Image: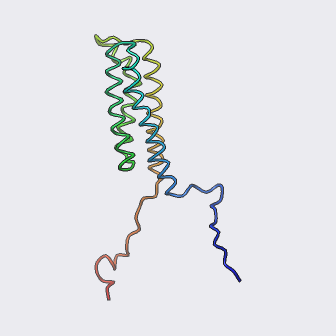
Amino acid sequence: MTVSTVPTRPASGSPPPPALRKAQHDQLIGGLMLLIGLVLCVVPMAQQDGAKDAQVNEAIVGTIVVLAAGSRIYRGAGVRSDLIIGVAGAWLVASPWLLSLGETSVYGGNKAYDVALGSALVILALIGLVLLRGRPDKKPQAPSSVRRGQGRI
């Protein structure tokens, strides 16, 4: 009798293995966040179109997003990086209206750009938090008798 060494696949309805879920969370979502941050930093300054106040705001938010997304890719995802990116995205969505309340100039074309990229950041941060919450990172603990030193021979 021979033993088959073919690995079995999980059922189609079962959740992906934890390693795949971790890779999706850390690399795919972090990479999209990093790409949006780079777009926020580079595109407004390269176009030289629109209000300078809005461009500076986008560059600052883009820098924060690039640093947080780079950290989450390098060190692994965490609640802190998702919250920072989510707050930065929410600020980017609200900033055209909040900045126009003061004595700053806001270009109308930047509003759609800011709302679209800010919304994408908020959605990615929420997806990241949901995936992080579903991650089974809990390490199994030894029985209490072994932890107290009673299980030794």
In the picture shown, does residue 144 fall above or below 115? below
Q: Position of residue 16 (x, y in %)?
A: 56, 55
Q: Position of residue 135 (x, y in %)?
A: 46, 54
Task: Give whichever of 19, 12 is nearer the camera.
Answer: 19
Task: Give whichever of 49, 122 is nearer the camera.
Answer: 49
Task: Give whichever of 28, 124 is nearer the camera.
Answer: 28
Residue at left offset 41%, top offset 17%: 47
In the picture shown, does residue 149 fall above or below 97? below
What residue occupies the far right of the structure in this picture?
1
The figure's colour scheme reads rainbow
Residue at left offset 46%, top offset 37%: 32
* Among the 4 quarters of the image, the one containing residue 94: top left
Q: Position of residue 15 (x, y in %)?
A: 58, 55
* Among the 4 quarters of the image, the one containing residue 87: top left
Q: Quadrant of the N terminus?
A: bottom right
Q: Quadrant of the C terminus?
A: bottom left
In the picture shown, does residue 126 fall above or below 55? below
Horizontal side of 146 relative to 5 (left or right) equals left
What residue occupies the far front of the structure in this picture?
46
* Among the 4 quarters of the image, the one containing residue 114: top left
Horizontal side of 136 relative to 11 (left or right) equals left
